[in-house]
Image (cartoon, rainbow, N blue to C red):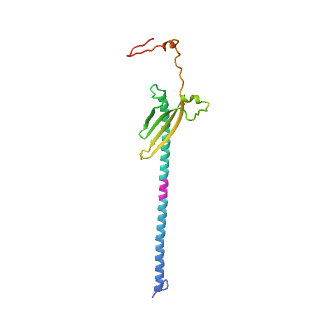
């Protein structure tokens, strides 16, 4: 007993069409998979770039904050130096390191640039000193990346009363006194 095939016998041309169609579908599936992989790679790359950029921004922001703190520290140190008896004066500069990656430099300038000859406080000009502090913060991972921040402060010198003029001062001005050596001098 012969059994009939489940499907009618196909002709050669019909088999070719079926075979060609399945090849086309298989090729389309490969293309579709490749497109999905390409899209996944593109999305992964863009996410990686976004994370790298976010890390760089965070690092730059942290360095800028460090530079600002260092500049403020420089102002504080410069003001303490002004109070010391051995302060070198307005033409001097103060610099120092907070850490191997953070440093400051402070310059002193006579006067206050905001005062003009028409200002009500212009007579205070010689008693004012402008401090310009520049703070530097270098990235420990890359020494070519450096943040800089400047802070400007104007301080006013405190007037101190000098000793009162002696009544014999006018008489002493008429004479010339010369002294050499390290001895006590009296007039």
Is residue 180 found inside the magenta-colored segment of the image?
no
The quadrant in which residue 119 appears is top right
Residue 133 versus residue 34 in the image, above or below:
above
Q: Residue furthest front?
A: 174
Q: Residue 140 in the image: x percent, y percent?
A: 42, 44
Residue 99 versus residue 46 in the image, above or below:
above
Image side of residue 37 versus residue 125, left or right: left
What residue is shown at x 50% (from left), y 30% (from top)?
79
Q: Residue 37 in the image: x percent, y percent?
A: 47, 64
Q: Nearer the viewer, residue 2 or 131?
A: 131
Q: Nearer the viewer, residue 130 or 12?
A: 130
Q: Quadrant of the N terminus?
A: bottom left
Residue range of the region highlighted in magenta in the rendering: 45-51
Residue 161 versus residue 76 in the image, above or below:
above
Q: Residue 97 in the image: x percent, y percent?
A: 43, 36
The quadrant in which residue 137 appears is top left
Q: Quadrant of the C terminus?
A: top left
Q: Residue furthest bottom?
A: 1
Q: Residue 111 in the image: x percent, y percent?
A: 53, 32
């Amino acid at each position: 007993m012969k059994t009939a095939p489940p499907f009618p016998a196909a002709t050669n041309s019909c088999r070719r069409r079926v075979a060609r169609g399945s090849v086309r579908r298989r090729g389309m599936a490969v293309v579709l998979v490749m497109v999905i992989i390409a899209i996944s790679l593109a999305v992964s790359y863009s996410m990686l770039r976004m994370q790298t950029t976010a890390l760089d921004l965070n690092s730059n922001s942290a360095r800028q904050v460090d530079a600002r703190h260092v500049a403020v520290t420089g102002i504080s140190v410069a003001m303490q130096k002004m109070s010391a008896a051995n302060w070198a004066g307005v033409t001097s500069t103060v610099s120092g390191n907070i850490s191997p990656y953070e440093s400051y430099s402070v310059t002193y300038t006579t006067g206050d640039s905001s005062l003009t000859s028409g200002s009500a406080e212009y007579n205070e000009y010689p008693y004012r000193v402008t401090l310009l502090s520049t703070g530097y913060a270098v990235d420990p991972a890359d020494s070519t990346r450096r943040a800089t921040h400047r802070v400007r402060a104007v301080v006013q010198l405190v007037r101190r009363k000098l000793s009162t003029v002696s009544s014999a001062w006018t008489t002493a001005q008429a004479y010339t006194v010369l002294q050499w050596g390290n001895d006590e001098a009296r007039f």
